[in-house]
Image (cartoon, rainbow, N blue to C red):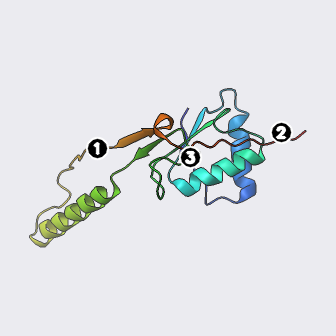
């Protein structure tokens, strides 16, 4: 199961309701892939408030490196995207498209696929590990 959902923009009540619904599904998620460190921390806090232990009951994963960590201590794995190179390539594409348009060419005549390397970090490479434990509510 995969689901792309806005999360950190939701109210605390709506986030916890969304998590509760996902966790009550016939096949609940085994992992949450979060776009950034703030989303990881928010999800961890919300899961703890619901009495869900991370990573014992559900695994958190991130898509950035946060501060001094290659992998946030609450995540089991992370995909580090080459953000600087993605931005640089995007600007190059934009400049090229503007130049083509200025020259009277159709800047949208073709698509270009650019593949950049992604670095995956796993919990085994992490010097510090955290887990959340919360008392279950009756």
The residue wearing badge 1 is: 117
Distance CA(mark 3)–CA(mark 1): 23 Å
- Identify the image quadrant of residue 100: bottom left
The residue wearing badge 2 is: 136
| SS for callout 2 | loop
Whether label 3 touches label 1, CB < 8 Å:
no
Q: Could you say where residue 19 lies in the image, as x and y percent from the top left?
A: 69, 44
- The residue under the point 55% across, 41% down is 3
Q: Could you say where residue 63 lies in the image, as x and y percent from the top left?
A: 46, 48
- The residue under the point 66% across, 41% down is 131
Residue 48 drawn above or below residue 94: above
Query: Which quadrant of the figure contains the C terminus?
Result: top right
The image's mark for residue 73 is 3
The answer to whether residue 6 of the structure is visible from this angle is: no
The answer to whether residue 23 of the structure is visible from this angle is: yes
Please give left or right for residue 21 compared with residue 30 in the image: right
């Amino acid at each position: 199961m995969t689901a792309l959902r806005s999360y950190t923009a939701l109210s605390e009540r709506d986030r916890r309701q969304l998590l509760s619904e996902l966790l009550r599904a016939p096949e609940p998620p085994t992992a949450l892939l979060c776009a950034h460190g703030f989303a990881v921390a928010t999800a961890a806090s919300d899961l703890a408030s619901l009495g869900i232990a991370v990573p014992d009951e559900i695994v958190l994963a991130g898509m950035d490196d946060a501060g001094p960590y290659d992998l946030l201590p609450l995540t089991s794995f992370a995909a580090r995207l080459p953000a600087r190179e993605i931005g640089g390539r995007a600007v190059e594409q934009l400049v090229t498209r503007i130049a083509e348009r200025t020259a009277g060419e159709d800047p949208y005549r073709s698509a270009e696929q650019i593949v950049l390397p992604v670095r995956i970090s796993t919990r085994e490479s992490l010097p510090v590990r955290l887990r959340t434990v919360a008392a279950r509510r009756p």
